Image (cartoon, grey):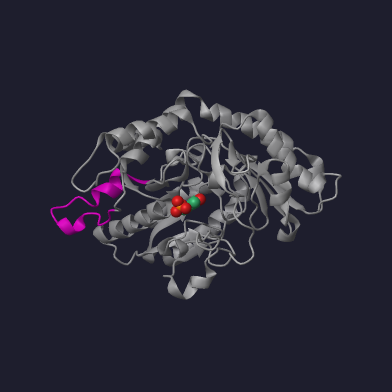
Amino acid sequence: MRDVLWHPYAQMKTQPPALKVVGGDGAHFTLESGERLLDATCSWWCMIHGYGHPRLVAAIQQQADTLCHVMLGGLTHEPADRLSQALVRITPPGLNHVFFSDSGSVGMEVAMKMAVQYQVQRGHPGKHRMLSLMRAYHGDTTGCMAVCDPEEGMHSLFAGFLPTHHFAPAPTAGFDAPREAVEAGIQGLREVLEAHHQEIAGLLMEPLLQAAGGLNMTSPYYVQAARELCDEFGVLLIFDEVATGFGRTGKMFAAEHAGVTPDIMVLSKGLTGGYLGHAATLATDRVYEAFLSEDPDHAFMHGPTFMGNPLACRVALESLAVFEEEDYLGKIASLNAILRQELVEDAKLRAHPAVEDVRVLGATAVIEVHDAASLEGVQDFARRRGVWLRSFGRWLYTMPAYVTQAEEMRQITTTMKDWFLSETPRP
Ligand SMILES: *Cc1c(COP(=O)(O)O)cnc(C)c1O
């Protein structure tokens, strides 16, 4: 039975059998055995309301009674209409058009196609490549793999198969860095644009937080400079807010820390509160208008079967309503205060010889170690303490659900710290 279901990023020969989840409530999920685990990762960062949220479950049930699915080709429905309007309202000013798809990767594919076709229809067919950043992660489909970090990313194996794009160095100045400290990163971006702008359609970035690339936290100054450079070189600025969107960095969208509106922005993960797969690619009037023409061939030629799925749109609307009515930004600020106090301000943790850095932004915290080997076994260690933690590479992180209670947040941070500091010898 074990080898029928093929698990992601898993060595099926050696990895222990996956744990069987039967339900969940709040920040916990429950295993078949009755064991409850406090999810420090909120299921790859998407279950922002935790499990079994009554309002989200009811929204799906009510929508299922009305309309489960209908194509968006030539048809529309109220959940898709309302969600597109809601997304225009909450995203940075100027993003007035919404294209739905079914996952973060596809949302990014849509963004890249949109940028290339925009350039063609504006008379710049030579601008057909992307500029991405080292340490970037934008998804696992072919087009997305090609804009992930080509060295450290998961996809070096496929190098011969992928189209080539341009890469600028990953920004190194942290979130609070003074403007001067960000200069080197900005200069790195400028150099690539100066050399190759004639062939660059768009600059892709995960603003402020390169998530899967090691939770690399960067400065709002860098994001602002990227906006200016894109305008200078006729390049579209594309924000991948799949991970950062819906509060993860402490504001609704990371773009808000910098006061920047990108030309195109992609949302997924938290969009539906994690309850169904969906994504949205938003565009400004300038981008949208490049597709308006008497020529049918200038239309945007894309259309996933499940785009605008009514169940997904309905639960996304409910997720947003809960987020706003229950002051989630306030909850995120409270989680942030605990993460700072318990991790960043813990001098013993910072001084531990295995630890390279401890960083926090919004409801995200990471302990970066010098050597990935020092995190081996941490998942089992955490499970014995009732916590679901999954490190990757040199990063032990938490991105909790926003409904995580203060004592639960401390249970997670204590578990993370104890891995390094606890007196009891590790097995
Ligand atoms: C998860 C993620 C994606 C891909 O989303 P999927 O829904 O897994 O396809 C893209 N970009 C970022 C920043 C992500 O974190």
In the shown orientation, is residue 13 left or right of residue 110?
A: right
In the shown orientation, is residue 70 left or right of residue 143?
A: left
In-front residue for pair 144/297 = 144
Q: Report whether residue 400 is seen.
A: no
The magenta segment:
280-303
Residue 418 in magenta stretch? no
Location of residue 380 with respect to 364 vertically, above or below: below
The mark tally for this picture is 0
Location of residue 184 with respect to 68 vertically, above or below: below
Q: Residue at x 49, y 71 (%)?
A: 158
Q: Residue 184 location, x and y as percent? A: 59, 56
Residue 287 in magenta stretch? yes
Identity of the residue furthest to the bottom in this view: 160
Q: Residue 264 location, x and y as percent? A: 37, 48
Q: Residue at x 30, y 53 (%)?
A: 304
Q: Residue 245 location, x and y as percent? A: 48, 41
Q: Residue at x 71, y 45 (%)?
A: 382
Q: Residue at x 32, y 38 (%)?
A: 84
Location of residue 306 with respect to 152 vertically, above or below: above
* Residue 311 lies in quadrant: top left
Identity of the residue furthest to the top in this view: 325
Q: Report whether residue 8 is seen.
A: yes
In-front residue for pair 222/312 = 312
In the shown orientation, is residue 353 left or right of residue 74?
A: right
Q: Residue 370 location, x and y as percent? A: 74, 58
